[in-house]
Image (cartoon, rainbow, N blue to C red):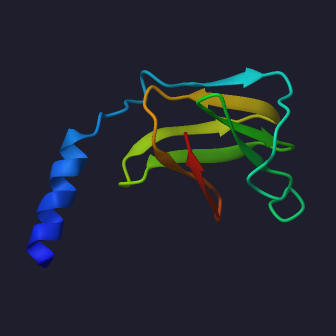
Amino acid sequence: MRRLIVIATLILALAMPVVTSAKVQWREISQVQGRSLTDPRQTDGVEIFQKSGAIVIRTQRTIQVRVYTILGQLVSQATLSPGTSELRLNSRGIYLVKIGNLTQKVAL
């Protein structure tokens, strides 16, 4: 049974489109209205949004951010300046956004 689960996971991982960092880049944007997935009072002022197929991060300080697929593939790694930045991805799915010791799930 365990072997079957491993094989199924590998097949799904190979079938999913690979998102390369060359195709996706963070860009600064103007302010975004929406509901944050994180409470900025508990996350040192970091807010994470999902808006129109993009991951949006608003921060008051410079941060290191990593975005992974649900299977653990690194999609993007960047240093973001204070302000609001977005990452447009070519494929829908569930992504994990990691900033320091904060990890947030984002569904696109």
Q: In which quarter of the image is residue 27?
A: top right
Residue 55 location, x and y as percent? 63, 37
Q: Residue at x 79, y 48 (%)?
A: 36
Tell me the quadrant of the picture where the N terminus can be found.
bottom left
In the picture, measured across the screen, residue 43 lies left or right of residue 22, that is right
Quarter the C terminus occupies = top right
Quarter occupied by residue 56: top right
* Residue 7, percent from left and from top: 11, 61
Q: 33 above or below 96?
A: above
Of all residues, the one furthest to the bottom in this rendering is 1
Where's residue 62, x and y in %?
77, 42
Q: State the residue at coordinates (79%, 32%).
A: 84
Image side of residue 49 versus residue 89, left or right = right
Write the residue at 22% across / 49% down: 12
Task: Point out residue 101 in the picture as x, y percentages from the top left corner.
Answer: 64, 65
Placement of 41 over or under 51, stated as above or below: below
Residue shown at 50%/48% (left/top)?
Answer: 95
How many numbered discs?
A: 0
Most distant residue in the right direction? 41
Query: Is 65 positioned to the left or the right of 8 in the image?
Result: right
